[in-house]
Amino acid sequence: MTRIAVVGGGRIGEALIAGLLESGRATKDLVVVEPSAARGAQLAERFKIRVSNSVTEAVVGADIVVIAVKPNVVDSVLTDLSKADLDTGADQVLVSLAAGVTTAHLENKLPAGYPVVRVMSNTPMLVGQGMSVLSPGRYAKPEQLEEVGEMLEAVGKVVTVPEGQMDAVTAVSGSGPAYFFLVVEAMIDAGVGLGLTRDVASELVTQTMIGSAALLEETGQNAVDLRVAVTSPGGTTAAALRELERGALRSTFVEALHAAKQRSAEHGASSE
């Protein structure tokens, strides 16, 4: 059984732990590093796992070390890691879920040859429906990358891309839930404006989004074909789509994602 050390017991760390235990990809051979005694006690009680307040102690002997902390805390964790009894000849691999922190930055802070994998996940992993995108560093072995992918499948789907595409990934899926929630919010407000109660409008919009996503995934059809199937010539849907196109919805999304990609690149550059 793979031994996993999760550094950071916040929402993302907790989501990963829950997914690993529920999927059977980890058992009691799992440790979380959490500096808050109160939070550590909550995690120990809920998951019946070992909790430590020491990075250097927890990572020794782990096959996978997951950094699930905010980007501004990563260097502190890396400093602690560099003090641990790490064997670069072993199969241990570091997985970073911190946004914008490059593999080069991670490698430069660790012993020479230490394998790392950078991951961009999104918040739906909190309900086991995340999208995690992997980029291996220079020293990560194919079997280690595969093992990391299998671990993250416990909280959703996984793909691998070259690190040069990570800023685009951040713009599309990393930030993507916020775009989705904004559309939901706007549709609910519009429904209220049309005379529906907020509760009814919320239920209509939420289930429509859930059902549409399921239709897209389960039928294998692309979004264009599914949209056309709903759009009768001269009908209500066509009238609504015409207004959305008049409001430059497509070009606005293009510009928005370009802006997100640019900001992601800036954050990455500032971390070096």
Image (cartoon, grey):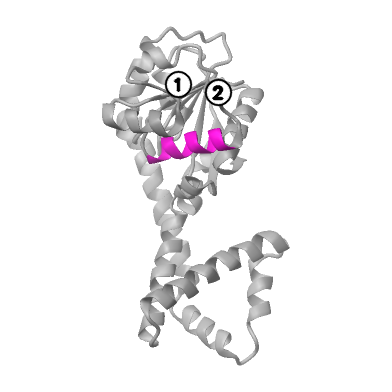
Crowd band around label 1 with a 10 angstrom C-alpha radius: few (<14), some (14–19), many (20+) = many
The disc label shown at residue 7, or none: none
Q: What is the x, y in percent for residue 79?
A: 33, 17
The one of 132 and 161 positioned closer to us in this rendering:
132
Tell me if residue 112 comes above or below residue 236 in the rendering. above
Residue type indicated by callout 1: Glu
Identify the residue at horizontal 62%, vertical 21% (top origin).
141
Q: Do the residues labelled 2 and 1 touch (CB within 8 Å)?
A: yes
The quarter of the picture where residue 22 lies is top right
- Nearer to the camera, 10 or 117: 10
Which span is picked out in magenta? Answer: 11-22
Please state, as top left, top right, bottom left or bottom right, where the N terminus lies in the image. top right
The quadrant of the picture occupied by the C terminus is top left
Rendered location of residue 235, percent (x, y) = 60, 91
Q: Can residue 187 be seen in this view?
A: no
Name the residue located 39 percent from the left edge and 28 percent from the top edge: 44
Residue situated in front as seen by the camera: 86 or 138: 86
- The secondary structure making up most of the magenta span is helix
- Which residue type does callout 2 highlight? Arg
Q: Position of residue 171 (x, y in %)?
A: 46, 51
Q: How far apart are marks 2 and 1 (CA)?
A: 9 Å
Residue 138 is marked as 2
Q: What element carries label 1?
A: helix
Location of residue 135 with respect to 139 vertically, above or below = below
Number of numbered markers:
2
Q: Which mark is residue 107?
A: 1
Q: Are there few (<14), some (14-19), or many (20+) residues within 10 Å of tag 2?
A: some
Q: Is residue 186 left or right of residue 236?
A: left
Q: Residue at x 50, y 53 (%)?
A: 172
